[in-house]
């Protein structure tokens, strides 16, 4: 209980249905438990002397206390089921409940990874069917299904490229990888992980790869280029075919970061653009859950030039049955993971594809682009777009509209919390000063988008009218006030210790 104050205007600290909640250690006692067990028989030491010799140190709570604790904590989280999640580049779209129902079907939800192949023919068929549609949508002849996430899929593609270069006898020579200055941070990290050095390609005035600068950097030591398309600024790379041709002419490979494939799925096939490898984020393009530490799925499609270098395992159909090929060929770079992908993500993605159909997948991309351009058109009256013209699936703004207001980008983000919105992606991409990257996705209705835009327009007008002090104080209505995120990340408190009362 707290003494009433401006921050806690009630005796309990509660604000109507927003219930103040302490740590479980503060609620429960270390000397009690919510469950009674009879004394256990002395069965002797079966742990080789490694048994615990002290109290475990966990708080004891009753069942009602435990349930209330976690329900109250859950109500302090923002979620896509509560409202729009405008994070740019992260594609936080609605996850249809149909997908969740399918993922929980017996035979999929309880599938053991070491089950005999004769007992899991349906699961293998599902993987093969999903692989087929991924190849159809991308125009690529092969796909590795085992990568567990986008960065893992990236690693898969670059390992295939490295294996292909070594097979040509050029492993010692081709050591450079080119990446745009706006690239996702995983791109250079993945290249370095594979033993390459990374060289940055500048952007032109339109926010796209500077083709002339790219050509100047090409040479017989370039292994590959890594380009996101649409790129991280929410723009389609107009010179994508010329980029691919230039890299291929120099003997390199074209890796496309498929993070934004949701903007072009059903509209453009990356294979037709000269792409040699591309990972696909099932959690972004095909609605499987995003974040939370996984499990994820990042299948990697491969062009004919890299097909034989794909990792094992993979599914083949032979004599009317499906088989999981575990033995790698002489050219395969090996194995990325113990088992073949993540079944829960595969079922969700295929359910999404089949419920939409090819025309529906195309409309998803069209609606995502339409929604982003609607947000761009509405907000540019008070906010400043980073680049001229239309965008793809996300609208990028900079902080010029806040100049001389005393309000910084971070203040604007915190004020959005008071309006009931999770902030958009802030300060990324780094090539735009004070970046604010908004991706509405196809999930949001015009009504939701109008309310969101009205809220941001109101904040922009307030910032320009001299309300800097109010912005610096935000958020006011959140369960906790503004935190020092940097200190929290660098000096996290990972252990609870009781406060010892002193006289």
Image (cartoon, rainbow, N blue to C red):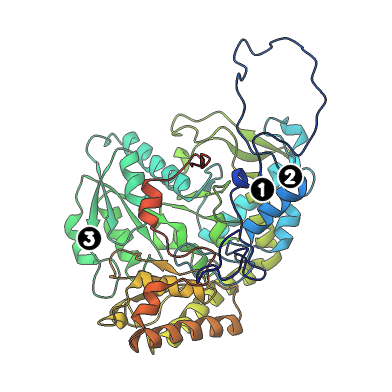
Specify whether residue 471 is in view: yes
Q: Which residue is mark 2?
A: 109
The one of 41 and 15 positioned closer to us in this rendering: 15
| Residue at 44 percent of width and 48 percent of height | 151
Q: Tag 2: Cα neighbours inside 10 Å, few (<14), some, or many (≥20)? A: some
- Residue 402 percent coordinates (x, y): 31, 80
Q: Which residue is mark 1?
A: 344
Q: Is residue 244 left or right of residue 295?
A: left
The one of 449 and 322 positioned closer to us in this rendering: 449
Query: Which image quadrant for residue 133?
Result: bottom right
Q: Say the numbered circle drawn on residue 214.
A: 3
Q: Earlier in the sequence, mark 2 or mark 3?
A: 2
Residues at discs 2 and 3 in contact (Cβ within 8 Å):
no
Q: Tag 3: Cα neighbours inside 10 Å, few (<14), some, or many (≥20)? A: many
- Residue 196 percent coordinates (x, y): 28, 41
Distance between the alpha carbons at the discs numbered 1 and 3: 40 Å
Q: Is residue 257 left or right of residue 43?
A: left
Q: Is residue 330 left or right of residue 103?
A: left
Q: Earlier in the sequence, mark 1 or mark 2?
A: 2
| Residue at 42 percent of width and 85 percent of height | 379
Distance between the alpha carbons at the discs numbered 2 and 3: 47 Å
Specify whether residue 103 is in view: no
Residue 162, placed above or below residue 79: above
Tag 3 secondary structure: helix
Residues at discs 1 and 2 in contact (Cβ within 8 Å):
yes
């Amino acid at each position: 209980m707290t003494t009433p104050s401006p921050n806690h205007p009630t005796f309990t600290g509660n604000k109507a249905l927003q219930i103040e909640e302490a740590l479980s250690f503060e609620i429960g006692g270390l000397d009690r438990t919510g469950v009674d067990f009879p004394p256990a028989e002395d069965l002797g030491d079966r742990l080789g002397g490694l048994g615990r010799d002290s109290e475990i140190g966990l708080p004891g709570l009753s069942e009602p206390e435990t349930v209330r604790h976690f329900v109250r904590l859950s109500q302090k989280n923002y979620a896509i089921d509560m409202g729009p999640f405008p994070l740019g580049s992260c594609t936080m779209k609605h996850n249809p409940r149909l997908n969740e129902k399918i993922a929980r079907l017996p035979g999929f939800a309880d599938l053991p990874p070491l089950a005999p192949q004769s007992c899991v023919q349906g699961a293998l068929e599902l993987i093969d069917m999903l692989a087929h549609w991924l190849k159809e949508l991308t125009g690529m002849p092969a796909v590795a299904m085992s990568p567990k996430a986008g960065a893992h899929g990236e690693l898969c593609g670059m390992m295939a490229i490295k294996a292909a270069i070594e097979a040509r006898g050029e492993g010692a020579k081709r050591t450079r990888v080119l990446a745009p200055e706006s690239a996702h941070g995983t791109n250079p990290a993945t290249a370095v992980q594979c033993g390459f050095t990374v060289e940055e390609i500048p952007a032109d005035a339109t926010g796209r790869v500077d083709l002339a600068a790219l050509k100047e950097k090409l040479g017989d030591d370039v292994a590959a280029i890594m380009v996101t398309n649409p790129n991280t600024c929410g723009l389609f790379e107009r010179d994508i075919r010329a980029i691919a041709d230039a890299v291929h002419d120099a003997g390199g490979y074209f890796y496309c970061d498929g993070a934004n494939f949701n903007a072009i799925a059903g509209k453009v096939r990356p294979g037709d653009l000269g792409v040699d490898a591309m990972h696909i984020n099932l959690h972004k393009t095909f609605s499987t859950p995003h974040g939370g530490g996984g499990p994820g799925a990042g299948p990697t499609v491969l062009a004919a030039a890299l097909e034989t270098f794909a990792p094992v395992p993979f599914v083949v159909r032979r004599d009317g049955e499906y088989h999981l090929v575990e033995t790698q060929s002489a050219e395969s770079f090996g194995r990325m993971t113990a088992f073949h992908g993540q079944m829960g993500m595969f079922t969700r993605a295929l359910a999404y594809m089949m419920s939409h159909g090819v025309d529906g997948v195309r409309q998803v991309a069209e609606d995502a682009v339409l929604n982003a351009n609607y947000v761009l058109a509405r907000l540019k009256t008070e906010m400043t777009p980073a680049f001229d013209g239309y965008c793809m699936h996300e609208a990028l703004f900079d902080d010029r509209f806040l100049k001389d207001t005393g309000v910084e980008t971070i203040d604007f983000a915190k004020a959005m919390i008071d309006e009931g919105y999770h902030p958009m992606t802030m300060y990324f991409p780094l090539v735009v000063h004070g970046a604010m990257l908004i991706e509405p996705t196809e999930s949001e209705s015009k009504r939701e988008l109008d309310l969101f835009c009205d809220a941001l327009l109101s904040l922009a007008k307030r910032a320009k009218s001299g309300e800097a002090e109010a912005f610096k104080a935000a958020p006011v209505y959140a369960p906790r006030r503004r935190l020092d995120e940097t200190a929290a990340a660098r000096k996290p408190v990972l252990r609870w210790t009781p406060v010892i009362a002193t006289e």
